[in-house]
Amino acid sequence: MGAALLSFSSFPALAADTPETGLLTAYANLDLAAADGPRSWLDDGGTGKGRFGNPHGDGLRVRPYVTEAGLVLQPDFGWSLSGLVSVIAQHDQDKAVDVSEAYLRWRPLPLGNVRLNVRAGIFWPQVSLEHGGGEWPVRETITPSAINSWIGEEVKVGGVEATFSTIIAGNRLSLTAAGFELNDTAGTLLTFRGWALHDEKATLFGFQPLPFMNDFMRGAQAGATRPMIDLDHHVGWYAKLSWAPPGPFELQYFHYDNRGDPEAVDAGQQWGWRTRFDHLGATLDLDAKTRLTTQAIDGTTIMGFPMGAEGRRWIDMRYRSVFLLATRQVMMGSAAGSVSGRIETFDTRNHGSEVLSDDNETGWAATAAARWSLLRHATLFAEALHIDSRREARLREGIAPRQHENILRLSLRLRGIVGD
C-alpha cells in the first residue's frame, strides 16, 4: 500500500495501489546517455557502478540507446480477480525478451473496515518508494537509488503475498505478509560487485554478469548469477507494516528472509545465499507539491561452508545504505512535471573465511533529475548522476580502488494502450 495512502493528488500512486485496466499497454524508453566512468558492470562484468560507462577513459562517451521496451497485459477476470503479465526487452539483457512479472491478484469486497489484496506469482516485494506502475518504472528520476536498484536486480520473488489494510481512529494501517521461493541467489551481486545505481531489472530466466573474483571464488562460483532460481526448496518470507497517521506522513517497516541454504549448489555453480534485511521507509509531504522520501536498509548475507576453528562461512557480509529524495511538482509552461534531488550513502563489510576486507566497499551518490509530461503518451526525463565509490578488489584488475563516475541521461518514455 505504501506512501500513496496519504498522497496528495499531484503525486502518482504506488504500483500496489494502481488499479488494473484490463488492457494491453506497450511502452519504450529511448535514451541519450553520456558517461565518463569505467566499463559498466553490465558490460561483461566491468567495475563501473552505473548502467553506462566509457571503457576508453577519454572523457564523456555519448550514445543513444533503446534502454527498455515491453508489453504489459492486465486482464480482468471478474469476481474480484485480475492479473498482470509483463514481458520486457532491455539493453544488455542476456535474453532478447523475457518475463518481468506475472501474477494473479484477488481483491474481494471489503469486510467491514478491512480490505484484502492478494497476489500470487512472480513480482517484486513492496519495498521501493521510487517505483510505481504496471511496468515498474521509477516515477521521478531515471535511475533508482542503490537500495531500489538492488531490489530490482536481486529481490524479485515467486510466491504468495497478502495485504490487509484498515483505518483506526484516522490512522491508516496495513500489514503485508508473503511466502516465496525463486530467490536463493539474492546477495551474489551485492557481494562480488557491491552496490550499483541503474535501472536494469531482473527477469525470470535471465543472468547478470559478475566482476573478476578472487582465486578461490573463481573456482567455486559461476561467472554470472541467475537472480530467479530455487536451489533448496526452502520457503522464504517477508512482512511489512505501514502506518499513516492523520496528516501528510507515512512510515513503513519491512523484514525479509529468504531462508536460503548457504551450502546449496547446482551443477552450474549457482549457490544458495542466506540473505536477510531490515528496511525502514518514510514519506513526508511538506505541502501539496513537495515530498521528502527516505529509505534505509541494513542486512546480512552468508554463503558457502564453515571453515577453520571459528567455523566462518566462505562469505559473511553486512550491507547498509540510506537515501533522502526531495521532489517538487512544478508546471513547466503548459506541461506538468517535477524536479528532484537525491543524496545517498552505501557500504559493505565482509567477515568470511574466503571473501575478506578487500571486497569491502564504501561510497556515496548524488542525483538531480527533472520530469516533463509532454503529451498524453510521452514523458521526458533529464538526469545527472555522480557516483563515488572505493573498493580494494578493483586492484585485481589493475584498477585504482576509488572511482568517480558521471552519467548524464535524457530519456523519452513512450507509453500507450494498444487499441486506444
Image: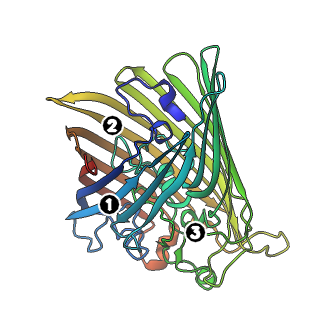
**Residue where numbered disc 3 is placed:** 358
Badge 2, how many Cα within 10 Å: few under 14, some, many 20+? many
Name the residue that disc number 2 marks.
340
Going by the numbered disc 3, the residue's amino acid type is Asp
Asked which secondary structure carries label 2, the reply is strand
Residue to which mark 1 is pinned: 68
Direction top: furthest residue: 169
Q: Quadrant of the C terminus?
A: top left
Which residue type does callout 1 highlight? Glu
The residue closer to the viewer here, 238 or 326, is 238
Regarding residue 351, the answer to whether it shows in the image is no
Secondary element at tag 3: helix
Instruction: Measure the C-alpha gap from mark 1 to mark 3.
Output: 35 Å
Q: How many marks?
A: 3
Is label 1 or label 3 in front?
Answer: 1
The residue at the point 48 percent across, 30 percent down is 4
Q: Is residue 110 above or below residue 377?
A: above
Q: CA distance from mark 3 to mark 2?
A: 35 Å
